[in-house]
Image (tube, grey):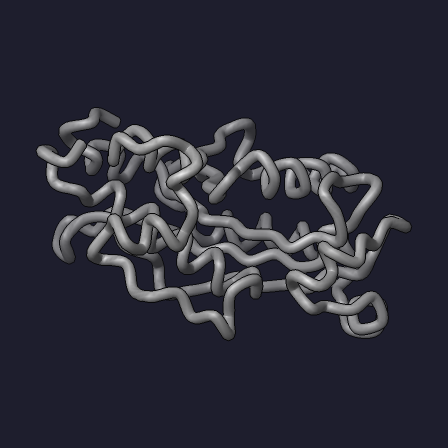
């Protein structure tokens, strides 16, 4: 994809903005407790890159012993709730793989996108590997924080969602009541990605 023509990848790749909530900072020791994903595709007839009007969301049964109180307070999902209502982790990953396959059609390659992708990617890749499920994203990953640095000419520490909301006029305000629900965060990250990809060439 060139800086002057961010639509050049249309038809070749489809982005999946993914957000996870966790019981701590790293996989294996801690749990992925919820996962949200929103596809993003290029629609030339509607002004470029747009979120697909479908969301993926799942809450997962715990598989590790680690539950950090600070991490658990962020998303508000309790261990008791997850154990009672969460989906088995292997089934959750199969559902995600099916969701990606349903949208990555016609030869388009699925690309994982995260806002600080190194965190979300580590959990998703670990869970796929743990259960022997082929990772539909392969090793492709895009970090919207790094993309914002390049497109807007800003330092990494200025790439928070709140700061990007001020810098990108197409972004709606964050809904504080929904922040840290994985499907809402994935949708907002999809809006960030689209705003960055759809910037006029003069802004790149």
Q: In this view, does 155 lie to the left or right of 182?
A: left
The residue drawn where x is 67% and y is 50% is 93
- Above-or-below relation of 137 to 31: above
Rendered image quadrant of residue 88 = bottom right
Residue 90 appears in view: no
Where is the N terminus found, in terms of image quarters? top left
Q: Is residue 176 left or right of residue 5?
A: right
Which residue extends farthest left? 202
- Above-or-below relation of 53 to 45: below
Residue 171, percent across and down? Answer: 28, 58
Q: In this view, does 95 lie to the left or right of 143?
A: right
- Above-or-below relation of 63 to 199: below
Residue situated in front as seen by the camera: 186 or 149: 149
Residue situated in front as seen by the camera: 197 or 135: 197
Residue 25, percent across and down? Answer: 72, 42
The residue drawn where x is 47% and y is 53% is 102
The residue drawn where x is 51% and y is 49% is 18
Residue 126, percent across and down? Answer: 72, 37
Residue situated in front as seen by the camera: 112 or 192: 192
- Above-or-below relation of 169 to 136: below
Which residue extends farthest right? 65
Rendered image quadrant of residue 105 = top left
Residue situated in front as seen by the camera: 51 or 150: 150
Where is the C terminus found, in terms of image quarters? top left
Residue 135 appears in view: yes
Number of dots carrying numbers: 0
The residue drawn where x is 51% and y is 70% is 178
């Amino acid at each position: 994809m060139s800086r002057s023509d961010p639509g050049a990848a249309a038809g070749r790749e489809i982005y999946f903005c993914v957000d996870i909530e966790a019981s701590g900072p790293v996989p294996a020791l801690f749990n992925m407790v919820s996962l949200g994903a929103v596809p993003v595709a290029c629609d030339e007839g509607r002004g470029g890159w747009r979120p697909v009007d479908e969301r993926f969301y799942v809450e997962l049964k715990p598989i590790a012993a680690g539950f950090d109180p600070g991490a658990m307070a962020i998303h508000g999902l309790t261990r008791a709730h997850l154990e009672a209502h969460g989906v088995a982790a292997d089934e959750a990953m199969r559902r995600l793989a099916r969701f990606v396959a349903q949208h990555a059609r016609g030869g388009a390659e699925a690309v994982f996108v995260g806002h600080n992708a190194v965190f979300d990617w580590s959990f998703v890749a670990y869970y796929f590997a743990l259960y022997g499920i082929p990772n539909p994203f392969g090793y492709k990953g895009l970090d919207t924080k790094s993309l914002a640095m390049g497109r807007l000419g800003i330092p990494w520490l200025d790439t928070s969602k709140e700061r990007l909301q001020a810098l990108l006029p197409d972004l709606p305000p964050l809904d504080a009541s929904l922040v840290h629900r994985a499907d809402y965060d994935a949708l907002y990250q999809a809006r960030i990605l689209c705003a960055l990809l759809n910037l006029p060439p003069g802004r790149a």
